[in-house]
Image (cartoon, rainbow, N blue to C red):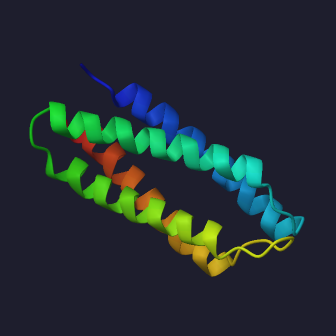
Amino acid sequence: MNLLPLLFLFLISAVGIGIYLVFLGLHQRKRSPGLGLTHAGLALSGFIVLFIEIYSGPIDKLNNIAALLLFFAILGGGMVFALNEEGRPPSMAAVIAHATMGLAGISLLIINLFLS
């Protein structure tokens, strides 16, 4: 069963919400815990779908590396959430590290899609 369309739906939705959250933090100096949890839920759902794809399909090194990068992005997102102070936007350095890992993982998945 090919779960890649569902995987990309979850991850691209998470990216879109993440971009909006960065906009809120940088330009409006606000935070949105509800949207942050939606972003996390979509990203975690995408990671679970990728995990199922990895364990039900053939060995694919790029998917494995992408999963590792996405796992680090999830950990980074948890750190952004845990270290956030009430009423203040999160540290942009932590957000950039979190986003870089996530986008690198998604980029590897897209590259692997075109190589397959």
Residue 85 falls in which quadrant of the image?
A: bottom right
Count of numbered tags: 0
- Residue 28, position as x, y percentages in the image: 90, 64
Residue 15 seen from this side: no
As drawn, which residue projects farthest toward the right? 28
In the picture shown, does residue 76 fall above or below 71? Answer: below
Residue 5 seen from this side: yes
In the picture shown, does residue 16 fall above or below 79? Answer: above
Q: Residue at x 62, y 47 (%)?
A: 39
Query: Which residue is more in the foreground, 48 or 16?
Result: 48
As drawn, which residue projects farthest toward the left? 59
Q: Is residue 76 left or right of residue 22?
A: left
- Residue 66, position as x, y percentages in the image: 30, 54
Q: Residue at x 28, y 42 (%)?
A: 51
Q: Residue at x 49, y 42 (%)?
A: 11
Specify the quadrant that holds the N terminus. top left
Query: Which residue is more in the foreground, 81 or 21?
Result: 81
In the picture shown, does residue 6 fall above or below 11? Answer: above
Query: Which residue is more in the foreground, 102 or 115?
Result: 102
As drawn, which residue projects farthest toward the top? 1
Specify the quadrant that holds the C terminus. top left
Residue 26 falls in which quadrant of the image?
A: bottom right
- Residue 77, position as x, y percentages in the image: 55, 64
Q: Is residue 20 left or right of residue 75?
A: right
Q: Is residue 92 left or right of residue 110?
A: right
Q: Residue at x 55, y 40 (%)?
A: 42
Q: Is residue 110 left or right of residue 14?
A: left
Residue 55 falls in which quadrant of the image?
A: top left
- Residue 105, position as x, y percentages in the image: 37, 56
